[in-house]
Image (tube, rainbow, N blue to C red):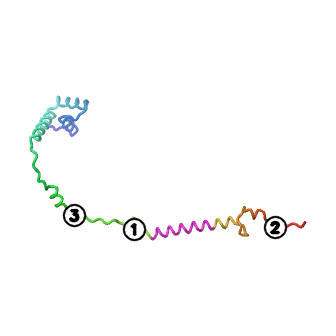
Amino acid sequence: MPMLPDALRLLISAYSSGDLAPRRRAAAERLLRHSREARRLLRELKRNRRLLKRLTTPALPTDLAVRILAALPEPPIISPSPVVPPRHRRWAVAARLAAAAAVLLAVAASSYVLTNPEGEPRGSAESAMRPRGPLPDT
């Protein structure tokens, strides 16, 4: 007996539950007209739906949730791990100290470069007013 491909079985299943857009519904109806296997599947699906509707809902005990939760194993205790492992923390501190030293060195070097030999900053008013070299005899 030939069997329908999964895509066509899904199409007939959706048709039986009424979950199809008009174009897909028309395709399913064409398939049902031309395929004995599709018609047999549709009858089986409708029969299963009727049987499922006849089933009664079993009465559940009121303490069912409590019993299920009691039967579950205790969850493991998860201890949080440090964000940075301890062996890397030393390197992070060393890197910060090195960065601070580099900044301090850059500030010291730039202040040295920006001062003249007399120790006064270049471009200051006092150094601009002071004559350079020996004074001419007049």
Q: CA distance from mark 1 to mark 2?
A: 63 Å
- Give the amino acid type for the residue marked by disc 3 in the picture: Glu
Q: Is residue 94 magenta?
A: yes
Asked which quadrant contains residue 29, the reply is top left
Residue 109 locus on image (x, y percent)? 63, 67
Q: Tell me the SS state at disc 1.
A: loop
Look at the image and give the residue range highlighted in magenta. Answer: 90-108
Residue 125 locus on image (x, y percent)? 74, 62
Which of 85/45 is in front?
85
Badge 1: residue crowd in 10 Å (few <14, some 14–19, many ≥20)? few
Q: How many marks?
A: 3
The mark found on residue 133 in the picture is 2
Q: Which residue is mark 1?
A: 85
- Give the amino acid type for the residue marked by disc 2 in the picture: Gly
| Disc on the earlier residue, 1 or 2 | 1
Quadrant of the rendering where the C terminus is positioned: bottom right
Left or right of 59 on screen, residue 107: right
What residue do we see at 71% from left, 69% from top? 119
| Disc on the earlier residue, 3 or 2 | 3
